Image (tube, rainbow, N blue to C red):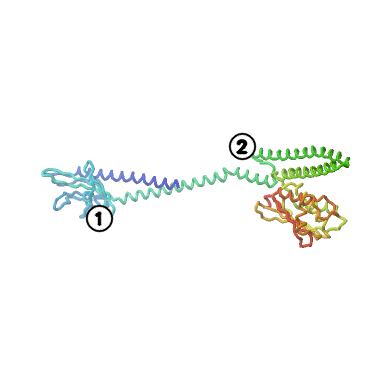
């Protein structure tokens, strides 16, 4: 846009300069014409000398001069050979006002209908006073051609300049900003867990940014580690007083002691729950931590087959090796471990575990589906088992915390958790969790 404005501006300036030079030439020829006139007695022009422009001698060349006697019966006294018997359209005939030197400037069509620029001067000489019009005309097409040639040159020059600017800018963006692209790729690797820090040589201007990003990553890791330490310290600090209270209350048979023991148990459970939530939240927000899903599930299945080996449950696993959970291995083991353990407890003889990736509103997701052929749960029982401590069958070992913990942990990862009827006849558990960017 700026180059186009520059082209228009330069063309306008050049046109003004060419027009001034063109008019200046006409004024010079006019002065020569006036000076070359040979005045006789009574103000009669008897002859005209050479004006000095060869084109005045070439027929219809576009360059003409003419001398007319104003008010005479045969007004054209002398004319250039190029004009032949034609007449020039004078500015005085068109009503153009004269300047201080009695000179008029104008234009009009020539003998061949070519555009002309004309200068005219009226001179009165002798008594009773003869008035003569001296006029010189030049071909304005030459001026327009000159301006057009210049405009084309300017367009080519500015076009090449614009192309050079564009190429230079492209090179600057492509090569000058390449370090920033490298920083972006490394940040993606950190988010996906493939790297822990930004490494490499960077320009001085970008090196400051790299150092600050590395400091931010270190600070985030330090905050998470401090949170874990504080959670552990708090847990140890509260367990001992609660144990003392419970032991003292257990030595008494009074209603007050039983109430104290009951409330101490509730406090212990609430503290454990909140500390576990804090620990899980700290891990869920850790940058760059990923877990290979298939190896984790295979390890869990081997462990469960040993624990529940006497039941003879047949378990199958379908999981692509490339899927990576965007979180810690400990959290994934807690989620999948509780669900697989429940499936082994309730299945009659068969369990299937399937993992697949699926797009989600919040980025890449993985879908973990566990089916068993056990008795299953109705809609009321499905809602009940998600409450902490709730159990459908007291004969099955457990504290009733597994599904509630899974639900809370899945929520911390902005995931999804659902229970439904399985095609195998038992319970289907579906969990949606985030995956690393490499799987998105």
Toward the viewer: 343 or 365?
Answer: 343
Chain-order first, disc 2 or disc 1: 1
Is residue 54 in view from this perspective?
no
- Image spot of residue 181 (x, y percent): 61, 45
| Mark 2 burial class by Cα count in 10 Å: few <14, some 14-19, many 20+ | few
Residue 272 against residue 311 in the figure, above or below: above
The x and y percentages for residue 202 are 62, 39
Residue at (72% x, 53% y) in the render: 323
Residue at disc 2, secondary structure: helix
Q: Is residue 312 left or right of residue 323?
A: right
Q: Residue at x 88, y 40 (%)?
A: 252
Q: Is residue 373 left or right of residue 38?
A: right
Q: Nearer the viewer, residue 429 or 320?
A: 429
66 relative to 210, above or below: below
User: Can you tell which quarter of the image residue 240 is in?
Assistant: top right
Residue 87 in view in this figure: yes
The answer to which of 91 and 213 lies nearer the viewer is 213
* Label placed on residue 208: 2
Coordinates of residue 121 in the picture (x, y in percent):
21, 45
Q: Which residue is mark 1?
A: 111
Residue shown at the point (32%, 49%) measured from the top left: 143
Q: Choose mark 2 or mark 1, whichever is in front.
A: 2
Q: Is residue 110 left or right of residue 207?
A: left
Q: CA distance from mark 2 to mark 1?
A: 77 Å
Q: How many marks?
A: 2
């Amino acid at each position: 846009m700026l180059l186009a404005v520059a082209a228009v501006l330069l063309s306008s300036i050049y046109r003004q300069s060419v027009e001034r030079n063109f008019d200046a030439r006409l004024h010079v020829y006019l002065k020569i014409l006036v000076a070359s006139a040979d005045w006789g007695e009574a103000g009669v022009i008897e002859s005209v000398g050479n004006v000095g422009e060869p084109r005045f001698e070439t027929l219809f060349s576009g360059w003409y001069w003419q001398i007319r006697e104003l008010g005479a019966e045969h007004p054209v006294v002398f004319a250039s050979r190029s004009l032949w018997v034609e007449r020039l359209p004078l500015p005085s005939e068109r009503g153009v006002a004269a300047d201080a030197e009695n000179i008029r400037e104008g234009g009009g069509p020539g003998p061949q209908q070519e555009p002309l620029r004309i200068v005219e001067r009226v001179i009165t000489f002798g008594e009773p006073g003869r008035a003569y019009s001296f006029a010189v005309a030049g071909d304005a097409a030459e001026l327009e051609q000159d301006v057009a040639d210049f405009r084309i040159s300017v367009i080519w020059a500015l076009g090449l300049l614009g192309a050079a600017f564009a190429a230079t800018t492209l090179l600057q963006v492509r090569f000058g900003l390449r370090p920033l692209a490298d920083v972006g790729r490394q940040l993606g690797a950190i988010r996906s867990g493939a790297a822990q820090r930004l490494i490499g040589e960077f320009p001085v201007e970008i090196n400051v940014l790299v150092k600050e990003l590395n400091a931010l990553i270190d600070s985030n890791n330090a905050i998470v580690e401090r949170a874990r330490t504080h959670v552990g310290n708090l847990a140890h600090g509260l367990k001992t007083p609660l144990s003392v209270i419970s032991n003292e209350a257990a030595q008494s048979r009074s209603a007050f002691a039983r109430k104290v023991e009951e409330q101490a148990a509730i406090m212990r459970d609430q503290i454990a729950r909140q500390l576990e939530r804090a620990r899980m939240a700290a891990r869920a927000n850790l940058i760059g931590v990923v877990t290979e899903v298939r190896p984790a599930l295979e390890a869990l299945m081997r462990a469960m087959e040993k624990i529940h080996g006497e039941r003879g449950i047949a378990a199958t696993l379908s999981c692509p090796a490339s899927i990576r959970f965007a979180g810690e291995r400990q959290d994934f083991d807690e989620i999948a471990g509780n669900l697989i353990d429940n499936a082994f407890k309730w299945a009659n003889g068969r369990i299937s575990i399937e993992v697949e990736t699926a797009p989600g509103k919040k980025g890449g997701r993985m879908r973990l589906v566990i089916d068993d052929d056990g008795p299953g749960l109705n809609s009321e029982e499905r809602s009940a088992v998600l409450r902490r401590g709730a159990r459908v069958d007291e004969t099955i070992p457990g504290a009733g915390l597994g599904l509630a913990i899974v639900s809370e942990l899945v929520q911390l990862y902005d995931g999804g958790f659902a229970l439904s009827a399985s095609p195998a006849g038992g319970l289907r558990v579906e969990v949606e969790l985030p995956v690393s960017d490499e799987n998105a």
